[in-house]
């Protein structure tokens, strides 16, 4: 059976380090989360982010805007938050309602306050200079932290990332590349996906289709990072079929694997943004 790579102990280590850094600051960093509409998953995620921020000792404000909020109004709010010296981190929860241009909204956030790491300036810094230069997307940054914690070697190894989103797949590929892995990005149009995934020593799946990743698609001894978290009824299911644990050397469980890391890295970005911007 595969070793289970749990996120909670790694997240706790991140929180402990952040608490130490916060204690040394003469101010309290602030996180502002903007949510538009009442998408139930977004409501739950935003609540969790704000709660964790407060528990760590950050100032946390949620801006809950009605579903019919216009793009101009949203851009105005972002402009105010950009200009406010007391605001350290800004996050606009996705997805936004139809009719709002997501790219335009993300590009309006000041790159130095962009704690999601989605602004093109931060994307460019990641791809050209590597992680840790700008603000990096939280989920792949959390995965890198987990791989380091569990001492999974990456250098020279074959990594396959399934999924090419701006939130996970693309930044994950950049980070693995900077860690000197040989990286392939697969997606919904990839032909013979199984042949490709079977080559992977590190297999990151960010698809969101429960159980699609079958044991036959996994190389014996591989490390499988399961980023798929899909709610089915009351259960949370990952991309990996349960049988994958019989083939892989290590697997991140769902829930309890990557999940706890994403909020931890969001708060890490908030503290980092504050330290950098306020000097
Ligand atoms: N929706 C799903 N994942 C994310 C994320 O990482 N950040 C934001 N802002 N919205 C999301």
Image (tube, rainbow, N blue to C red):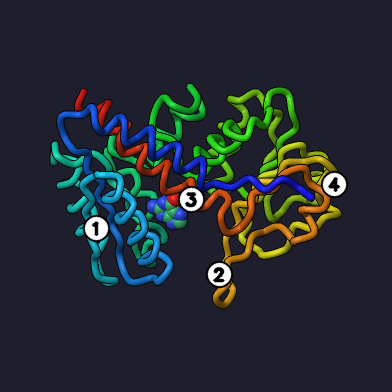
Spatial CA distance of label 4 from label 2 is 28 Å
* Residue at the spot 58% in from the left edge and 71% down from the top edge: 235
Q: Position of residue 111 (x, y in %)?
A: 31, 35
Say which residue label 2 marks: 231
Q: Position of residue 10 (x, y in %)?
A: 51, 40
* Residue at the spot 68% in from the left edge and 28% down from the top edge: 154
Count of all numbered marks drawn on residues in the image: 4
Mark with earlier residue (4, 3): 4
Say which residue label 3 marks: 260
Say which residue label 1 marks: 62
Mark with earlier residue (2, 3): 2
Mark with earlier residue (4, 2): 4
Mark with earlier residue (1, 3): 1
Instruction: Look at discs 4 and 1 and give the one toward the viewer.
Output: 1
Mark with earlier residue (4, 1): 1
Q: Nearer the viewer, residue 60 or 126?
A: 60
- Graded by Cα atoms within 10 Å as few (under 14), some (14 to 19) or many (20 or more), the crowding at tag 1 reads some
- Disc 4, disc 3: CB below 8 Å? no
* Residue at the spot 26% in from the left edge and 50% down from the top edge: 54
* Residue at the spot 19% in from the left edge and 38% down from the top edge: 28
Q: Quadrant of residue 197?
A: top right
- Disc 4, disc 1: CB below 8 Å? no
Q: Position of residue 131 (x, y in %)?
A: 48, 28
Instruction: Look at discs 1 and 3 and give the one toward the viewer.
Output: 3
């Amino acid at each position: 059976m595969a070793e289970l790579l749990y996120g909670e102990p790694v997240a706790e280590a991140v929180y402990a380090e952040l608490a130490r850094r916060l204690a040394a600051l003469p101010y309290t960093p602030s996180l502002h989360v903007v949510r538009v509409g009442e998408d139930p998953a977004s409501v739950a995620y935003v609540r969790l982010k704000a709660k964790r921020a407060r528990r760590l000792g950050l100032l946390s404000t949620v801006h809950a805007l009605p579903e019919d909020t216009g793009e101009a109004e949203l851009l105005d709010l972002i402009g105010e938050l950009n200009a406010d010296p007391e605001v350290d981190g800004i996050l606009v929860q996705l997805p936004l309602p139809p009719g709002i241009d997501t790219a335009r909204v993300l590009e309006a956030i000041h790159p130095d306050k962009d704690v999601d790491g989605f602004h093109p300036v931060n994307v460019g810094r990641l791809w050209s200079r590597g992680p840790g230069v700008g603000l990096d997307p939280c989920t792949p940054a959390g995965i890198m932290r987990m791989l380091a914690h569990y001492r999974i070697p990456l250098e020279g190894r074959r990594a396959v990332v399934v999924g090419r989103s701006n939130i996970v797949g693309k930044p994950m590929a950049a980070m693995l590349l900077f860690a000197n892995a040989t990286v392939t990005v697969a997606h919904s149009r990839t032909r013979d996906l199984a042949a490709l995934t079977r080559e992977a020593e590190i297999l990151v799946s960010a698809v969101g289709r429960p159980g699609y990743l079958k044991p036959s698609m996994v190389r014996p001894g591989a490390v499988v990072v399961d980023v798929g978290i899909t709610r089915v009824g009351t259960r949370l299911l990952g991309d990996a079929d349960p049988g994958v644990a019989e083939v892989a050397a290590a697997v991140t469980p769902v829930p309890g694997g990557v999940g706890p890391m994403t909020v931890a890295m969001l708060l890490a970005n908030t503290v980092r943004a504050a330290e950098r911007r306020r000097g």
